Image (spheres, rainbow, N blue to C red):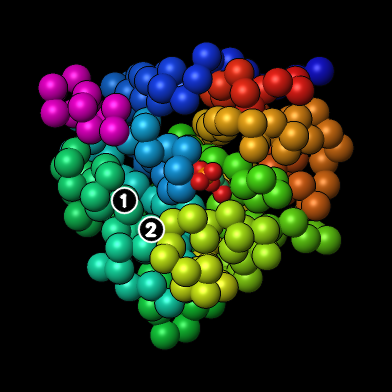
Amino acid sequence: MLKNITLHVVSDYSALSTAAAKLFATYVAANPVGTYGFATGGTPEGMYEELCKMSESGKLDLTKITAFNLDEYVGLAPNDPQSYAYYMENRLFNRTGVPMANRHIPSGIAQCPNTECNKYEELIHKCGGIDLQILGIGTNGHIGFNEPENTFAGQTSHVALAEETINVNARFFDDINDVPRYAISMGMQTIMMAETLLLLASGDSKAKILKEALLGSITPHVPASVLQMHRKLIVIADKAATKYI
Ligand code: PGA
């Protein structure tokens, strides 16, 4: 049973991108000054492209939102093309005019990552929490960089990437040895505080883990499984990703 979860199954990645962008735009229209949480990776790229098009044609205004990203690689500066800061600038923020002062991503080059984590967590609270958080899911069930562990990660923290994550993310780098081994990630508790969660999943590679996350037992070995306890979880997934549900 899918309990409190709203699941939209769409035909393919292109339909997922359009549906996610439309839903996101509805939230922004209702709350143009809201605080929105963003994810990176391959899955939301199509959605961000749709949002840029909507913004460019005057159908969406992101110029008053506040943005918080889920995570950043430790060791990568914002101008590094592999950093998530660079990803967001180029795939969404610059093209939609999200105000510079409202773009929040943990710094990957902070002298003390733990201090950076605490500052980031405080800033989210100071801004009143996140209204709508976009999420992807890793093939190992991670959310942000909250990797499978024996306990659920709480607040924003300095984390080690799992071997599986390093292998999967190597496709974005020239060499697997270039993939950073550490990151700063919002914790599961931080993510669970968001008013609404929008989880996106596409493709066969996500089918097994999506089933475990939505229908399996709630365990820190599948971090995404805790999302079952959220009061408002919306999932948009394509047929391939939902083939076991
Ligand atoms: P992906 O990554 O969108 O590139 O599949 C998702 C994730 O690792 O959380």
Mark 1 neighbour density, 10 Å: few (under 14) some (14–19) many (20 or more)? many
Task: Please name the residue that numbered disc 2 is placed on.
Answer: 84
Q: Which residue: 61% across, 60% down?
A: 167
Residue 43 falls inside the magenta stretch: no
Judged by its main secondary structure, the magenta piece is: helix
Q: Which residue: 61% across, 18% down?
A: 239
Task: Please name the residue that numbered disc 1 is placed on.
Answer: 88
Q: Is residue 170 left or right of residue 95?
A: right
Q: Quadrant of the N terminus?
A: top right
Q: Which residue: 74% across, 34% down?
A: 208
Image spot of residue 203 (x, y percent) = 58, 30
Three-letter residue code for mark 1: Met
Q: Is residue 143 left or right of residue 243?
A: left
Residue 245 against residue 52 in the figure, above or below: above
Three-letter residue code for mark 2: Tyr
Q: Quadrant of the C terminus?
A: top right
In this view, the residue farthest toward the bottom is 111
In this view, the residue farthest toward the right is 217
Decide if residue 148 is in sight here. Answer: yes
Image spot of residue 145 (x, y percent) = 59, 58
| Circle 2 SS class | helix
What is the C-alpha distance between the residues marked 1 and 2?
6 Å
Stretch of the chain drawn in magenta: 49-60
Image spot of residue 69 (x, y percent) = 42, 52
Q: Are marks 1 and 2 in contact (CB under 8 Å)?
A: yes
